Amino acid sequence: MSVTSGIQQAVIKALAQLYSQPFSAKDFQINQTKPEFEGDYTVVLFSLLKPLKQSPDALGKTLGEHLIQTSPALFSSFNVIKGFLNLTITDAYWTAMLNDHYGNNAYGRKAGNGKTIVVEYASPNTNKPLHLGHLRNIFLGWSVSEILKADGYDVIKTCIANDRGIHICKSMVAWQKFANGATPESTGTKGDHFVGDYYVQFGTEFKKEVQALKATGMSEEAAEKEAPIMKAAQQMLVDWEAGKPDVIALWKQMNSWVYAGFDITYKRIGSDFDKIYYESDTYLLGKKLVEEGLQKGVFFKKDDNSVWVDLTAEGLDEKIVQRKDGTAVYITQDIGLAVVKYEAYHYDQSIYVVGDEQNYHFKVLKLICEKLGLPSSEGIYHLSYGMVELPSGRMKTREGTVVDADDIIDEMIKVAAQKTEELGKVKDFTAEELGKLYNTIGLGALKFFILRVDPKKRMIFNPEESIDFHGFTASFVQFSHARAKAILRNEQPDNNFTLQHSEPLLPLEKELIILLEKYPAAIEQSAFEHNPSVIVNYCYELAKTFNSFVTEHRVLKAETENKKQLRLRVCQMTANVIASGMRLSGIEVPERM
RNA sequence: GGUCCGGUAGCUCAGUUGGAUAGAGCAUCAGCCUUCUAAGCUGAGGGUCAUUGGUUCGAAUCCAAUCCGGAUCACCA
């Protein structure tokens, strides 16, 4: 049980005994005491004054005295200032907490609750390489999955590959036209970049053709429709849907190049999936569900044969679910996928990590699934996050302002290597160890930079300013871990030693232990909010306090053996919690750096 | 125009189930490495919490209006 819930229960019990009135945890607040006052935790009394007909002073004093008498193991002293009852927790309580958990690597993780959550993230188009926006998506999805696991859920990580549609046909057409049979192997290019280059080339060629047609007096709109390369792409889409063998073969070939490229990037950033779905499979299922919905009367057909759903009663519009030619639209395949996922996992929740520009889409998706009476509908949850922008605004492929994922990763690792060399603290490392360390630091900095921000907020990335390695960063937290480990390499805590509390805990010792005690609550909150920044911020605060502690107090040369053992345990628990918390964010921590 | 999200220090962000004098980092300035890692520590300066009104013992937090920025309202995905 956490301290706060312990205090809550003690207060509820005390109020029942003193005033014979029943209260619940919601009736009053418990905060950490502000540093300028004496005490560890504070009961805010204002909300209790009216029902109890008491003055703040009288209630505070009565309650404080009663608490100390009835729970001497928990409370050692109190003071009342205005309506605030400040309680000091006994050193014995904190020491016991430390003793119970300092060697526990699973501290803060809950036992399985038997519930299943499916998380979908990454979900790239298969026609161009990943960029910084994808990285935010992947880091978020991966981290939320891990946090939910720590909170007791069974988590299935999934990805939907948007592998069909006009976008991939554009790359295919350009490859046919310009590549002369080139391949990623023959050119030494990473597969996703290779295919992406043809996508760009398609755009360039298209522009050229439109200009040429306009020069003959055609309007821009007509020119865009008539451009031969665009017509070729559209024809290719038709051929693809018709299953024309050579088109399918090319499509498979190009997709496989892209997947090989993605796999390299996923591996570098330590991301993985339990199951990958392909839009080329799920869109047909969606169409089947549209047919069923039509029979149930959930959907209706317009004169031109297109199929719609009427969401005006829900305050939205009519929404198309199938084109007049019978082909699937974007949402059709998502309806199918929701069912496929539910049938496979019978999930309690299905989280979609998708940018906030699709808020409307997911609102519609959930409504449609509800109307169809699908059991999958209730658990649908859109984890919506903000765009990553440049100081100049949105990243645009056409203007070449996209920050490529592989480039930024390379850059981060390069700078990490440079900084590490400057400091010269790991000269005895082997080349292999160094490579690993640079990865840990570089990637850690990138992940931390992205995950420390509340997902729902837009974030700005300035390529001119390199991501920092000082202050509120992964390096800082990693450094703190390495520092703790350095101490522990000299001496491990003696597990047979029994801590005394003859000497009072010093402020920084206590502050650290209080923080460590809050780790399980941080995981819980992070999971509840689907928000990794809670954990990231927590780890930073812990690391910061630890650095102050280590600067201020000696561990190995502590005044007494008792203090030394206490501090060694604090070091070990801090190192464990930092490693655990960073792991939930996908960030590794080094033993040395 | 409708809907949704955001606006906190020069910059990047915490804090928002209402609590005491609003917090960090970067940047600036001043100190600290014969002592477990200085990617660190200590201190200083820096705020109309977008604006106005309301709710109450108490508002950055809740409500209303307004201003600014963004997203979305596609037979694109």
Image (cartoon, coloured by chain):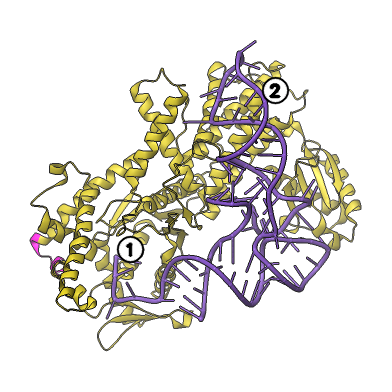
Chain colours: A yellow, B purple
Image coordinates for residue A226, horizontal then vertical, percent: 16, 74
A41 part of magenta stretch? no
A241 part of magenta stretch? yes
SS of the residue under disc 2: loop
Quadrant where the N terminus of chain A sits is top right
Would you say A261 lies left or right of A505 here? Answer: left
Residue at (37, 34) in percent of width and height:
A414
Q: Which residues are magenta?
A: A236-246
Q: Which residue is mark 1?
A: A337
Q: Which residue is mark 2?
A: A499
Determine crowd level at label 2: few under 14, some 14-19, many 20+ residues with C-alpha closer than 10 A: some
Q: Give the amino acid type for the residue marked by disc 1 in the picture.
A: Leu
Quarter of the image where one finds residue A176: bottom left
Name the N-terminal-most of marks 2 and 1: 1
Q: Are marks 2 and 1 in contact (CB under 8 Å)?
A: no
Quarter of the image where one finds residue B62: bottom right
Q: Nearer the viewer, residue A18 or A246?
A: A246
Determine crowd level at label 1: few under 14, some 14-19, many 20+ residues with C-alpha closer than 10 A: many
Disc 2 and disc 1: Cα gap in Å? 57 Å
Residue at (27, 61) in percent of width and height:
A279
Residue at (46, 42) in percent of width and height:
A467
Whether residue A149 can be seen here:
no
Residue at (19, 55) in percent of width and height:
A198
Identify the subunit bearing mark 1.
A
Q: In terms of secondary structure, what is the magenta stretch mainly? A: helix
Q: Is residue B48 above or below residue A404?
A: below
Q: Nearer the viewer, residue A593 or A203?
A: A203
